[in-house]
Image (tube, helix red, strand yellow):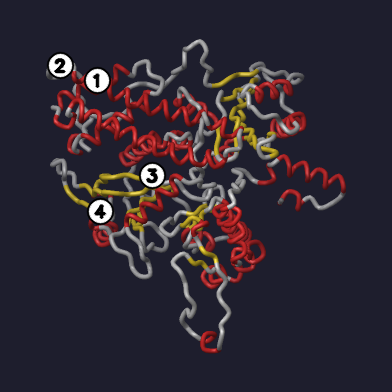
Amino acid sequence: MTHNPPSLFPRVLDDGRAYAIAGALLEGFNRHYRLFRETSAAAKQRFEQADWHGQQRAQRERIEFYDVRVEEAAERLQTEFQASSLPMDTWQQVKLHYIGLLVNHHQPELAETFFNSVTTKILHHNYFHNDFIFVRPAVSTEYIENDEPAAAPTYRAYYPTPATLRETLQRIVHNFQLALPFEDFQRDLDDVLEALRRQLGDVRWRTNFQIQVLSSMFFRNKGGYIVGKIVNGFHETSFVLPILHAQEGQSLAIDAALFGEEELLLLFSFARAYFMVNMEIPAAYVQFLRSLMPRKPRSELYSALGLQKQGKNLFYRDFLYHQRHSGDKFRIAPGIKGMVMLVFDLPSFPFVFKAIKDFFPAPKETTRELVQGKYQLVKTHDRVGRMADTLEYSNVAFPRVRFEDALVQELLHHCPSQVEISDRDGDGQVEVILKHVYIERRMIPLNIYLQEATPQQLEHAVIEYGNAIKDLVAANIFPGDMLWKNFGVTRHGKVVFYDYDEIEYLTDCNFRRVPTPRNEEEEMSGEIWYHVGPKDVFPETFEPFLLGNASVREVFMKHHADLLDADFWNTHKQRILAGHVHDVFPYEPHKRFIHQRAARAAAEAGTDTGAAQRG
């Protein structure tokens, strides 16, 4: 990308086309955001009706909205204005007019990204200059507020006293006007108040004590979430109240009370599906969420809100900024090399870059198109906190001087069709241009983590590994290649799957037991003597590949031996085929009020509390 200084004044008179094009572009964006917001707002009704399949379908379809609207806008510009043949002076005017149209717009940052998406689809990449696209934001998103009289503010502020705290919490929940009654609202309020007292402790209520709550609920999968913060003097405490169905389609319950940045980071994890939130001013929601999670990049917050194209745009800006302020080199990523992906990283940047190889050694049988399809499946599927989100880019240019020679050689050997090394701008700066690349959050590969782990860390990681697989099973995903190297450990100690080229829907797989040999010849055979179909899976054969380490085997067999039994997989498969949607919670089981109540009851009865909390 060249960086010519933008022209502040058009060099030719505007013949009216530039303004019309700018207006058509904004109309295209406004249509996109209206449809995006409508399906996000409808999540509340789907939640109330327990329409879990509809919720999943809407989440998948919403991801496709943006590209469809970009195609529509580009086609309109070509049909009405022959946009690709317009002189560059006209495109400069288009951008200036567009900026003017965004002055009082409620989603200017999203509209700028939409402008970039449409114009780069029309114009040749040699023209991707600062003059014609938004490399940096041109319109501020600070202090945007909806000034329509009937519009709800971004967040509501409540001012309880110690005596009115219960009443205030009741009002906070009721203000969301959920259609279903609560199973036992007073019991839930008792649980929230108890959790709040434990969190705040014996603190003095300052003059400015208040509870600020975002005006729209967050919906994902089978849950709705109230998000806010408690302000007391100079201290702020973020909180989330998850609301679930207590009886399918009949009543609701507040399931937990989550406090603090760490809890929210898990809820907004890059390994989870995007939320559905009805937002008039997304920048204001992101600003509020940043006050709750200051370590969370704005790019990831936009993505978590379902605005993944804006997240992708901001991520790339952050990446370019990091490159300008760092000096280390891209290298081949540590760990066992994959057969399908060439993985590299920049040590100072917490992400990895993945390029699909041009050829795959045996026994891999796949194609570039199939691999891309698997990654798209993960993008649109419920990732249940166990599959890393990916950012997909085309024609990404890196400075050649920042690449280790060994990495360049690997790219030219394994991905020659996807790599170009040239001075394409003629300015003497040689670049490595990747035609297609995925970018994911960097994690410690699980196989490396286990080699370096203490006994306690090893036990936790193996339990987490099994839990990760079981969460994927609940989401109708069979990971395919379950080797330790295909999983990573996050800084929160969560185990996440990140190798997608062999994943399948669980319901498409045929889980079988290894047949009993019919004679001595079959028993002694070194080859597989029974028929194996393309989607056949034999869980008992996982053992030799996974459990060679005695310490790992002991923990695995204690907690997850059922993963080696075909009956486990088939039971879940049949439940999913019957229409059941499993609960997968974005917080630990002991946080759930139902388990806390059971634990208290067990303690009062003098029985074991552990079983209740593990349920």
Residue type at the position of mark 4: Gln
Q: Amino acid at mark 2?
A: Asp
For disc 4, the marked residue is 418
The relative height of residue 261 versus residue 525 in the rendered view (above or below) is above
Residue 159 at x, y percent in the picture: 66, 17
Residue at (18% x, 18% y) in the render: 9
Work out how far the residue at label 2 is from the one at label 4, CA to CA, in angstroms: 42 Å
Q: Is residue 245 visible?
A: yes
**Between 186 and 214, the one nearer to me in the picture:** 186
Q: Identify the residue position indicated by label 1 in the image.
A: 96
Image location (x, y in percent) of residue 60: 45, 41
**Marks 3 and 4, how far apart in space?**
17 Å
Disc 1 residue type?
Leu
Sequence-earlier tag: 2 or 3: 2
Q: Is residue 366 left or right of residue 503?
A: left
Left or right relative to 488: residue 186:
right
